Amino acid sequence: MRSVFIHRLARAYGATAVLLLSTALLLALLDGALSVVFRIKDSFARPVSMYDAPLAFRGYLARRLVAREFERVPLGRFSWLAFLGSSLAFGALHQRFVAGTLAGMLYAVAVYRRGALTDAVVAHAATNALLAFYVLATGSWFLWE
């Protein structure tokens, strides 16, 4: 069926037009595929997201909300102000505020559990990986916008 369409197109508009159209379609497909590849890469390899967020929100902000001299506050020290404040700030930087805030709360719990920032980094990386797989499986591209 495709060959009939291409043959008719070539007769009507010439071989050059068919070549240009085929090239344009190939480039469009390649652009779409590359877009997906780069989004997946960004989900897994975005250092600002996976490393800087735990440092900023759990390593600094949560402890700064406990005491002015945040360096003296251990990572596992809990306070409601630090928990809610850092989670709300994390949510505010995400397109979906409620989902971002809930994720921030889970990442805070991960840090409080053992007092290690690496737990929040691993949790954030796992979240990004699961989101990437979900988007690719369901075509819910709006979650990546």
Image: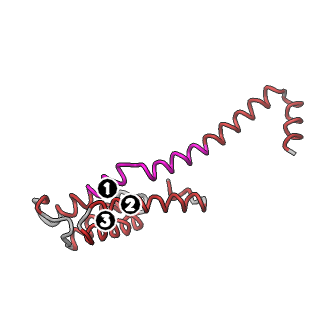
Residue at point 13%, 58% (across, down): 71
Element class at badge 3: helix
Q: Nearer the viewer, residue 94 or 2?
A: 2
Earlier in the chain: of badge 3 and badge 1, it is 1
Q: Which residue is mark 1?
A: 53
The residue type indicated by label 3 comes to Leu
Q: What whole-number distance in Å separates the C-alpha atoms at marks 2 and 3?
A: 16 Å
Q: In this picture, is 40 found above or below 118?
A: above
The residue type indicated by label 2 comes to His
Residue at point 21%, 69% (across, down): 76
User: Residue 124 — which label?
Assistant: 2
The residue type indicated by label 1 comes to Ala
Element class at badge 2: helix
Q: Which residue is mark 3?
A: 88
Q: What range is drawn magenta here?
A: 32-56
Image quadrant in which you'd find residue 105: bottom left
Query: Dot 2, how many residues are within 10 Å of its Cα: few (below 14), some (14-19), or many (20+)?
Result: many
Residue 10 in percent (x, y) is at 86, 31
Direction from residue 82 to residue 94 in the image, left or right: right
Earlier in the chain: of badge 2 and badge 3, it is 3
- Mark closer to the observer (2, 3): 2
User: Residue 128 — which label?
Assistant: none
Q: Magenta span has 115? A: no
Are the two marked residues, 2 and 1, in contact with CB atoms closer than 8 angstroms?
A: yes
Q: In this picture, is 76 found above or below 19?
A: below
Q: Nearer the viewer, residue 38 or 67?
A: 38
Residue 77 in percent (x, y) is at 18, 70
